[in-house]
Image (cartoon, helix red, strand yellow):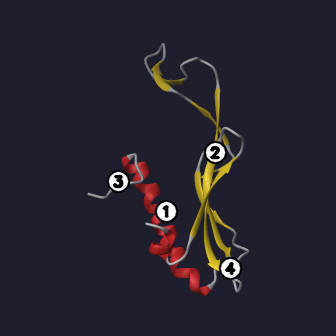
Amino acid sequence: MSGLEKYGLPILVEVIDISEVLSIGFSLTLQVQDASGELVPALRLEALMDEEEVEGYDRVGMGPDGFPVLTTFDEEKKIVKGRCFIVRRDLATPVPEAMQEPAKALIGNLMAAVNRYYAFGSCFSEEF
């Protein structure tokens, strides 16, 4: 189902890259037609990892005292970019009145997909 069918507005989806091999998220842009009939961006949402760096681990092992110890397979310190998943938009740009309902529906569906992913491992899981 397209954005036009579901929300009444076309949606442009773009990947947010920080290098040629690493993506940190994606953007969703609701588009409207201007006077000439061209599609122009009206509202941009970004869903991405923040810029904080944290130490990453591959497994939980057992220390010499019997307590759990976080380790990596190669025993080297591993730094991972992004600690928190965030959804944001530019608050300086107001949402046009005609776009408020589609924007609320899009944000609600995006958050439901994130919740399903963390709860069930797939954003395509249906609630039971």
Q: Quadrant of the C terminus?
A: bottom left
**Where, by quadrant of the figure, is residue 37 drawn?**
bottom right
Q: Quadrant of the N terminus?
A: bottom left
How many angstroms separate mark 3 from mark 1 (CA)?
13 Å
How many angstroms separate mark 2 from mark 1 (CA)?
18 Å
- Please give the residue where the numbered disc 1 appears in the rendered image: 110
Mark 2 belongs to which amino acid? Answer: Ser
How many angstroms separate mark 3 from mark 2 (CA)?
24 Å
**Where, by quadrant of the figure, is residue 66 drawn?**
top left
N-term mark: 3 or 2: 2
Q: Residues at badges 2 and 1 in contact (C-beta under 8 Å)?
A: no
N-term mark: 1 or 4: 4
Mark 1 belongs to which amino acid? Answer: Leu
Mark 3 belongs to which amino acid? Answer: Ser
How many angstroms separate mark 4 from mark 3 (CA)?
33 Å
Q: Residues at badges 4 and 2 in contact (C-beta under 8 Å)?
A: no
N-term mark: 4 or 3: 4
Q: Is residue 93 above or below residue 87?
A: below
Q: Residue at x 64, y 45 (%)?
A: 23
N-term mark: 3 or 1: 1
- Please give the residue where the numbered disc 2 appears in the rendered image: 23
Extreme residue in the left direction: 128
Q: Secondary structure at mark 1?
A: helix
- Please give the residue where the numbered disc 3 appears in the rendered image: 125
Q: Secondary structure at mark 2?
A: strand
Nearer to us: label 4 or label 2: 2
N-term mark: 4 or 2: 2
Residue 94: percent from left, percent from top:
68, 79
Crowding around mark 2 (Cα neighbors within 10 Å: few <14, some 14 to 19, many 20+) is: few
Mark 4 belongs to which amino acid? Answer: Pro
- Please give the residue where the numbered disc 4 appears in the rendered image: 94
Residue 82: percent from left, percent from top:
63, 44
